Image (cartoon, grey):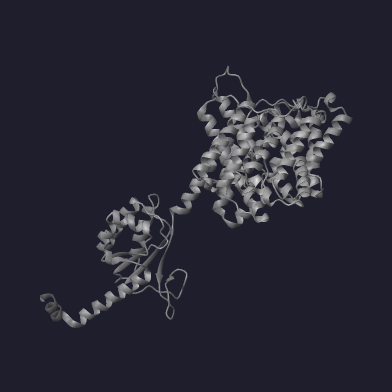
Amino acid sequence: MALETLPFPLLRSLTHYRASWLASDISAGLAVAAVGLPSAIAYPAIVGLPLETGLYASIAAPIAYALFGPSRVLIVGPDAATMTVLAAAVASILASMPADAAVDRAAIAAVVALVVGGICLAARLLRLGVVATFLSRPILVGFFAGISVSIMVGQLGRLTGVAIQSDGLVPPILELIKKSATIHWPSLILAVSMFALLQAVKVWRLPIPGPVFVVVISVILSRLLSLPQMGVAVVGDIPFKLPSLSIPSFLSLPLDKTILGAAAVFLVSFGSGIVTTRSFAARSGESVDANRELIGLSAGNIAAGLFGAFPISMSDSRTAIAFSAGGKSQVVGLVSAATLIATLLYLGPALRILPLPALGAILVSAALSLIDVGELRRIWQISRPEFVFSMITMWGAISFGVLNGVVIAIAATLVYLLHKTMYPRDALLGRIDGRNGLYKLHRWPGAAQIPGLALYMIQGSVLFFNADYVGERVRKTASRLPAGTRWFVIDASAIVQIDSTAAAMLDAVGADLAAKGMRLGLAELHAEVKAILERGGVIERIGTQYVFEDSEDAVRAFGAGEEQAHSQEKRGPTADRAQVGR
């Protein structure tokens, strides 16, 4: 079988692989593993999962995506935002289970990963890749800023050594204040030092990634200063072995909470991940097909679930490292996975003494990176309403929790869409002496209405939620027209959708205009709009002679009617009577 006919994108891409790429792919894969290792160990703590699950996710998911994913440079893996939504989903599932039920967070996370993979497949079959754009950039920026606060609050216990029992945003802070006398100062000092080191690496732009630097330094300090003996919590015993293939038990889990939680994870991970994909695709010259990306994301999540891990997403940090290191293909992901496998097998003793305050510092730094102040400033400069929606989403995630924050993000998106379409712009059109064409009266001071004819453009679809508004705008505009206006023609060139409510509105508007001595007309109807109005009898009641190909056609028809009227006036009443008597 020719490689081009194989179903795996990786194998097909090997037909175009160049030997000169191998060195850069290996180098990039090692760099991705180095950057991914600290987050792979740290991120499971957000959900309360065993730390090795992060390594399993960082091994299984990239291999699966390399086989099934369409992008040459994209790397998948654990993601802070996705983990925060997962934490809320797991908490919701646990709250719905019987009090005496056995709790296995790792199994629940694996089931959610499998369900997310299934949702990705269903979305691919239904060609719903468009949902990636459902959460707008301002909504995502606000949501990520909100969940970053949730991540930072969740690390208070690791940073201070205080056993925090409370959940939510404010209760853990209040509990920490009450237990301030029990703060373990060596842990706090180490955490603050490692956080400062992370920021220094960014400022100094050292070639070594900050999390890698912190892991190495903190392990060395743990060994030299005997930090475990000082009471500093460390990673401890981890079953450093390769993940095994298994299907997690899901029969005892509440189906509704599991599906809803997985849907929230899918929406956030795919919505934000496709932004990452498009960003790097633009740099590499690749095209992005959101529906094909669903296959790769599905494969990554299903693999993660089958190997005891949790949902993954497109990783911007890993992809950025692969891109900057010169990675050319998905061989980068395979090399990264192989490196992490070697880490599991041979670097266990070093990771066992890794201090938890250092991991907390890494998570706080990652959470801060989710707050894109520059993007918020840019949104403020471009569109104040979009900035308001961004702040509403951030407030929702902070005040009501991450899962409710997802609901608020969706609600904010719907409100934003309604706000943009509820009030379509409109304009009266007229002529400018010495020029051809029609011009908007409010934009062109020299434009004037054609005497006796009102050309009114509606710039947007007219549907049930804005039909009343549009009808009132038409009536208000008609009431301000000069005396002697006989035709009111709606330019429908920008009306791409209409429904039965809008059709009824046009009927009512036509009757109101007729009462004022004006004839309603329609110009440049789209085929679908015209078909709906025909089925509703609107066009028949308006009169087919008042439905025009475009506004210029309406102007010509009005002019011809005026000429005919003037002609009849010149012939006089006797001529008219003679004409009628024939």
Closest to the observer, 481 or 115 = 115
Give the quadrant of the C terminus: bottom left
| Left or right placement of residue 456 versus residue 313 in this view | left
Residue 123 placement (x, y as % from top left): 52, 41
Residue furthest out toward the bottom: 570
Total number of numbered discs in the rendering = 0
| Left or right placement of residue 428 versus residue 133 in this view | left
| Left or right placement of residue 564 versus residue 99 in this view | left
Give the quadrant of the N terminus: top right
Closest to the observer, 13 or 559 = 13
| Residue 469 higher or lower than 104, as above or below | below
Closest to the observer, 164 or 553 = 553
Residue 447 placement (x, y as % from top left): 43, 74
Tell me, yes or no, if residue 361 can be seen here.
no
| Occupied quadrant, residue 91 | top right
Residue furthest out toward the right: 224
Residue 47 placement (x, y as % from top left): 65, 31
Residue furthest out toward the left: 581
| Occupied quadrant, residue 352 | top right
| Residue 166 higher or lower than 279, as above or below | above
Please give the name of the residue rendered at 80% of the width and 29% of the height, measured from the top-left corner. Answer: 348
Residue 439 placement (x, y as % from top left): 44, 71
Residue furthest out toward the front: 1
| Occupied quadrant, residue 542 | bottom left
Tell me, yes or no, if residue 293 can be seen here.
yes
Closest to the observer, 351 or 305 = 305
Please give the name of the residue rendered at 56% of the width and 29% of the height, measured from the top-left corner. Answer: 92
